[in-house]
Image (cartoon, rainbow, N blue to C red):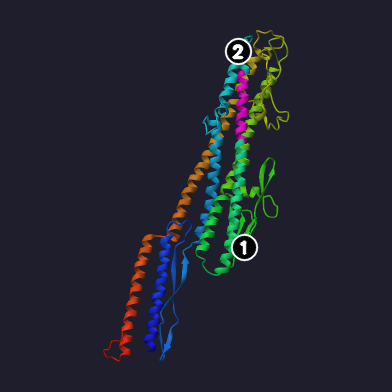
Amino acid sequence: MATIGTAFNIATGALDADQAALDIVANNTANVNTPGYTVETPTWEQNDSASLGGMNFGTGVSMTGAQSQRDSVLEQAMQQQTQTESASASRLTALDQIQTIFSGATSAGTDTDSASGVGSDLTSFFDTLSSLEASPADDSVRQSVLSAAGTLASDFNSAASQLEGQRQSLDEQSTSVVEQANTLLTDIAQLNVQIGSTSPNADAGTLEDQRQQDLTNLSQLIGVRTVTTENNGLTVTTMGGGLLVSEGQAYQMTSGEDDGVSHFFDAEGADITLDLTSGGGQLGGILTARDQDIPEVESSLDQLAYSVATQVNKVNELGSDLNGNKGAAIFGLPASATAADPAGSAAGISVVMTDPSQIAAAALEAGSSDNTNVVAMANLENQGIVNGVSPTSFFSDMVTSLGSVTSEVSGENTAQQASLTQLNDQIGSISGVNLNDEAAQLETLEQSYQAASKLFTTLDQVMVSALNLGVQTTYS
């Protein structure tokens, strides 16, 4: 009877174990489309054997739980690649918008045609000076020179304004990204507490799935490093080592304005802006565009505006106007702009000359019909007055350089997306739910359950026969 009772226990345990395993398969199938869900497999354990009459007998099986199928190496690689791809993607978006300013395209609600005309308007301005060479005393031609100068100055203003507007937009985006990151840091810290209290030494299942999903989302926003602690917790830092999460504590990042843009600080007040810029993630790309790409274009545009304005003014002041007076400045620049630091020139350039007769086409004391000085002004178009390069060539080089950087970042992003897809497929093959595999597992477990049920029925019949001592009765 003891042996039959033991067999009953084995059959019952097998039914319980198979039922628990079937529940895991059902849960896997139900979560096939759940983002971040990691497939679980049942873990089996042989029960301790029993000794009877000097012989050892097995006592069946138990299902000890479910084990999520993770690969920490692949997950770490996925985290790093996500940060890299997200950084190049956000930077590429910003670079495309910068290019739009100079491409002549029109975005929704923003006319960028005037800004894109800087190059063509440089040519138009110098063309009007060339026209004045043939008719130095013609008022209408003189007026066309001032009109072309006004259009050029307006285009410089427009381009500078749009660049600054984009820089401010990126600045607003950066603070928004940090706010989102802070929320995820809090979530990760809370999950650390839950995991530490429920599964400090084992797989925590869906809790770890949630934490990994939060970490993936965080990696899309900022560059981070992670270290797993002894109690299955997670320490999160910036790429430079700034502490963000430790056990159940989240260390929030803060922001403050410096030189007109937002800077970011860790919980101890240290400025981590450069750390976040180089770390990757969406924020890294945004800050690179805000603090590197746009300032470089602005600097080139300022240098071009300053050089053209000062050189044209210089030549005009060397000549004689239509009334025989010494020439005056055609363009005005901000008082703070200098040859060493022309910052603000594109935004502040203007035409200060209002009377076309003041254009000094003639050399000093050469008479109103002389064109010597206006020839010198027109020749500036082909002279290296902007860092040793002609104005139109300088602008062309600036736009070409911007296009090269954009193309380079685009190529990097394409390669990173391919790598990210490959890693995602590798992780999916290990951690994702495969419905074919689950169907095969389901069939195996069903057969095992049926076998245990059959054993249970057979044992029941044996037990009835034993109780009846082989006599046919109505007891069953």
Within the image, what quadrant is residue 267 found in?
bottom right
Compared to residue 314, the image places residue 229 above or below, namely below
Magenta-span inclusion, residue 163: yes
First in residue order: circle 1 vs circle 2? 2
Residue at left 70%, top 33%?
341
Q: Is residue 207 left or right of residue 357?
A: left
Q: Is residue 32 left or right of residue 378?
A: left
Q: Is residue 188 left or right of residue 337?
A: left
Nearer-the-camera pick, 233 or 300: 233
Q: Amino acid at mark 2?
A: Val
> Which quadrant is home to the C terminus?
bottom left
Total tally of numbered discs in the picture: 2
Residue at left 42%, top 71%?
20
Label drawn at residue 130: none
User: Disc 1 vs disc 2: which is toward the camera?
Assistant: 1
Nearer-the-camera pick, 374 or 275: 275
**Region of the chain picked out in magenta, as a range:** 147-164
> Which quadrant is home to the N terminus?
bottom left
Compared to residue 186, the image places residue 7 above or below, namely below
Nearer-the-camera pick, 349 or 414: 349
Kindly tell me whether residue 389 is visible in this rendering.
no
Residue matched to label 1: 248
Residue matched to label 2: 141
Compared to residue 28, the image places residue 448 above or below, namely below
